[in-house]
Amino acid sequence: MGRALKLGVILLTVLFLAGCWDYQEPDETAWVTALGVDRGRENLLTVTLQIAVAAQVAGGVEGPGGGPGEAMVVVSMEAPSILSAIELTHAWINRRVDLSHARVVVFGRELAEAAFDRYLMPLTRHRDFRPSTKVLVANGRAETLLQQGEPVLETSTALYWTLQTGAWDLTEFIPRDGFGPIVVDAKSPGAAAMPALVGLEREDEGPPDPTRTPKGAHMAGTIPRRGGTKIDVMGAAVISGGRMVGVLNGDETGIVKMTRGDFRRTTKTLEDPLHPGQFIVVEVVPREPPRVDVRIMLEGDITSIQSGEHYERPEKVRLVERAVEESFRSDARVALDKAQNEFGADVFTIGFHAKRLFPTWPAWEAFEWDEKFPDAEISIDFDFRVRRIGLMRETVPFR
């Protein structure tokens, strides 16, 4: 009898475990691909959801008049918190709103400057958010960016955000950090968080100026370009003390990535040391990981010499190397001065290396690195070597 009772309990348990009580149909779900958070107009927050129209992404829906339908729907609402806004959407969205596929969370600049941590930290408790979700700061309002920034090359907004924020390893001016690292940096002594800066393309072309401007001198919303999607991702917001304290342009972001070990490659356009007014183009990649004394080892290839000077020769290649080093030193001086005197925030995460010198965590906290960082003597140096000269052994000028 006892054996039969045990067998009955096991069968009953298996019966209950076999159910799909929490299953939800994909076509009954509203998949959010981007979440925007701004300071509210009629409540504490304006929360914006970019929702994928799954059937249209798959090519199965026609819009009004028989043409293609929209691949996304953008809705905004006023609410006291992010999660209460999600609940509020069910008053007019006939599907269950799901945040598990959200690729980005975009904070409006005004809100980020006032209380970034107050609205970021609650998301760490929500089961739908993943460490891979990217955190961005809009150079303006997140609501406007998500409403107007429609992808061009992809019908899937999720794919667009994945590819765009994943381009950090293709260029110096997009930060690498995702949701998890930004939370850690924002809460840790000896560091500052650095979410990417995103903005809408500038509407005016600006005054004519044909002089050379470094490509990294811009940031999201100020890039001189025309065509394509309306969204720019360039530069970074600096988060310290729970709020945004300033921004870095593309070149400054690249310097910070070098010190953090996140740098992969960039292209430098340098004025020719022997022929002013003409330029040399060099592709730069890391040579070694950055050292604790902030000496950054780089190498690269010469890809263009406008003047026709024979910089391929051993006695002249050092001129190119010195020009690249000085260009990066100049960028580093500007970025370091901004971090110490304008932000007062260790966006370089030098403190993460300094804390290894302390025997215990209380000793490190008692040192108060964040307060000492603005007055610390810090130098960032570069060692660059030309490795390849391209597919041409020697430059021959036109005659």
Image: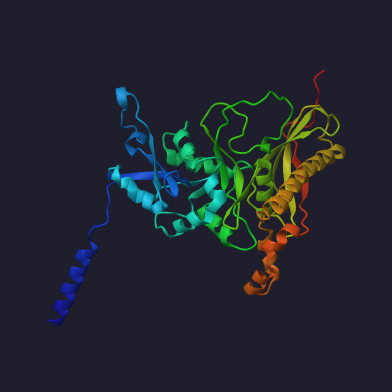
Residue 73: percent from the left, percent from the top? Answer: 37, 37
Q: Is residue 129 left or right of residue 296?
A: left
Looking at the image, residue 292 lies above or below residue 99: below
Residue 154: percent from the left, percent from the top? Answer: 45, 34
Q: Is residue 381 left or right of residue 76?
A: right
- Residue drawn at 18 percent across, 77 percent down: 6
**Quadrant of residue 206 within the rendered picture:** top right
Q: Is residue 190 left or right of residue 6?
A: right
Residue 323: percent from the left, percent from the top? Answer: 81, 40
Looking at the image, residue 69 lies above or below residue 347: above
Q: Quadrant of the C terminus?
A: top right
Residue 177 seen anywhere in this rendered image of the structure: no
- Residue drawn at 18 percent across, 69 percent down: 11
> Farthest bottom residue?
2
**Quadrant of residue 213 within the rendered picture:** top right
Q: Nearer the viewer, residue 324 or 335?
A: 335
Residue 164 seen anywhere in this rendered image of the structure: yes
Q: Quadrant of the N terminus?
A: bottom left
Q: Nearer the viewer, residue 134 or 92?
A: 92
Report the colour scheme: rainbow
